[in-house]
Image (cartoon, rainbow, N blue to C red):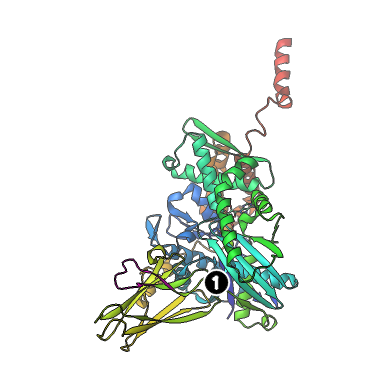
Amino acid sequence: MAIIGIDLGTTNSLACIYRNGKVELIPNELGEYKTSSAVSVLENGAVLVGAAAKERLVSHPESTAASFKIWMGTEKTLALGGRRFKPEELSALVLRQLLEDARRYLGELVEEAVISVPAYFNDDQRCATKLAAQLAGLTVKRLINEPSAAALYHRYSTQSGDCQLMIVDFGGGTLDVSIVECFENIIEITAIAGDNRLGGDDIDRAIVAHFCKENGLTEEKLEPSLRASLYHQAEMAKIALSSAPAASLSLQQGEEQYSLVLTCDLLRQLCGPVFQKVRAVIGRAMKDRERAGRINDVILVGGSAQLAVFGDFLEELFGRRPHVAAGPDEIVALGVGLCAGIKERAEDLQDLVMTDVCPFSLGVSTYSYAGDRRPHMAVLIPRSSMLPASHQERFYTLHDNQTGLRFEIYQGEGYFASENLKLGELEVRVPPGPAGEQSALVTFTYDIDGILHVSAKSSGGDYRDRLILNPNLHLTQEEQDRAMERIQEIQLAAQGSQRDQLLLERALRLYTQLLGRERDMAARLICIWKDLMERGDRIGREKNYTQIKEQLDYLEARSQADPWDEDFWFDEAEEDGAEDEAEDETED
Ligand code: ADP
Ligand code: MG
């Protein structure tokens, strides 16, 4: 049975397999490698995943969700079409869709995978990713850090000499920076820094905020579909600016028309705060690496790395323009596919070795003296330790006749325990005795997936494993079975209909964005296409697909047209006919 590699992204997800000595991306039903990580509940209760669901963010915001990866490992739930979903459940639906596409493409059932996570994902987020996979009926063979996957593929595909690289992965919702040493067939990650809440989405948000400010609007008061449309336009404009000097956004609310022209200078200005955070993260990675020494190359991966103003910013920072990896939004997936090949013990990958490090320090809260009021961190595994890492430390009682030793487990860099992320706690009983006589030995093991295991054994022989805090993430077998059932019960939108559904959703989205004659045109197309879909008329759809798609492409172009581009100056050629008529009249 095949093991596949999955890049479960904030914005887009991809699947990949290593077979016949090659890494191969797995196309979805639309023939595309990228599947939008968007989920929408249809009127009939079925769930749509991918590009068509992304369209529904604008037309049906109340039943659609995207970018939910940023909530993984938190207790937040999202309401979709009257049901509440945890982020892990939404991710599980994306995984189910990827598995379904892989099954169709490979002709065999897939039940095992290597999944990538942002290097800077904390323990809760990693556990949440594993849970999402379980809910989708998938066994996780390994979690791999996204930039490490990118480094693996880069090394595999370029075969350059020994070098030190910096990988900057700038996606939709996360930033990861890794320093990588390549020596012969060994790829050693030496430092990781990142931000789990920083990406292209923040740039879209800044554009939308600016649009609202300039037009005297309050974002929160906008109707959900208008707001979603504005986000959609912000993203389109941002992407357009990598190849055009300006792009525009516009919104019609009642009688009022609002607009904004986005230029490169304005975009640069709006990106300022985001780029400052990027700069800080890069600085942290540089400081943390094991050996100083020069960086031979900076490699940019992730969708947002393609942003021209981002390249400008890095050029200024490094004094040289870093190059964007070929296929920057596919390289992580290719690396995860390779990793799946290594897991399967593919012959030709056997000598490829990769080591990774932990992004955060791990420890327990402790008191230094009997009257100490505010517990601080006793770090057992400092950040940047090579994985897997294991460390033991003995802790003693502080009071006479203390009955137990209680440990709170934390992840983070703060001196005081409370400044860090609490991962769990555990308590062991000790026999009575004078202060300092009884003790407990605490063992931390950070596994290769970046997940922490903790146990403690007291001098009295009491032994405990950690209790996990976040009950959402650590279900009993029964709870897990029930949660899995709930996810497996949901029907994914019918096979073979993705392309047609996407066309309909796109027309519906354009309808909400356009007005006047163009809106009427969208309405006509919706009517024709919806009828063909509802009647199950396959032949009719085959016959009309291309033509309707072309008309939607036209409407798409109209919806993005720069208002300063056309229809602004009085166009003589266009008016010629009218003048002729006028002349005719005077002659009469
Ligand atoms: P993730 O790994 O978070 O799923 P991706 O690496 O696919 O994300 O990147 C998605 C982000 O990249 C989005 O914010 C999107 O707007 C942005 N993006 C995609 N293509 C481009 C482009 N050509 N120029 C600028 N930004 C882009
Ligand atoms: Mg990514």
Residue 97 on image: x %, y %: 53, 66
Q: Quadrant of ligand 1?
A: bottom right
Residue appearing at x 49%, y 38% in the figure: 212
Is the residue indicated by label 1 positioned so its CB lies within 8 Å of ligand 2? no
Q: Is residue 195 left or right of residue 580?
A: left
Per the image, the residue denoted by label 1 is 384
The rendered magenta stretch, by its main secondary structure, is classed as: loop
Residue 437 located within the stretch drawn in magenta: no
Q: Is residue 414 left or right of residue 332?
A: left
Instruction: Give whichever of 276, 290 is nearer the camera.
Output: 290
Residue 372 located within the stretch drawn in magenta: yes
Q: Is residue 403 left or right of residue 312?
A: left
Q: Is residue 193 visible?
A: yes
Residue appearing at x 61%, y 54% in the figure: 304
Tag 1: Cα neighbours inside 10 Å, few (<14), some, or many (≥20)?
A: many
Q: Helix, strand, or loop for circle 1?
A: loop
Instruction: Give whichever of 402, 140 is nearer the camera.
Output: 402
Q: Amino acid at mark 1?
A: Ser
> Which quadrant holds residue 487?
bottom left
Which range of residues does the magenta coloring cover? 365-378
Residue 295 on image: x %, y %: 69, 65
- In the displayed structure, 511 sits above or below 463; it is above
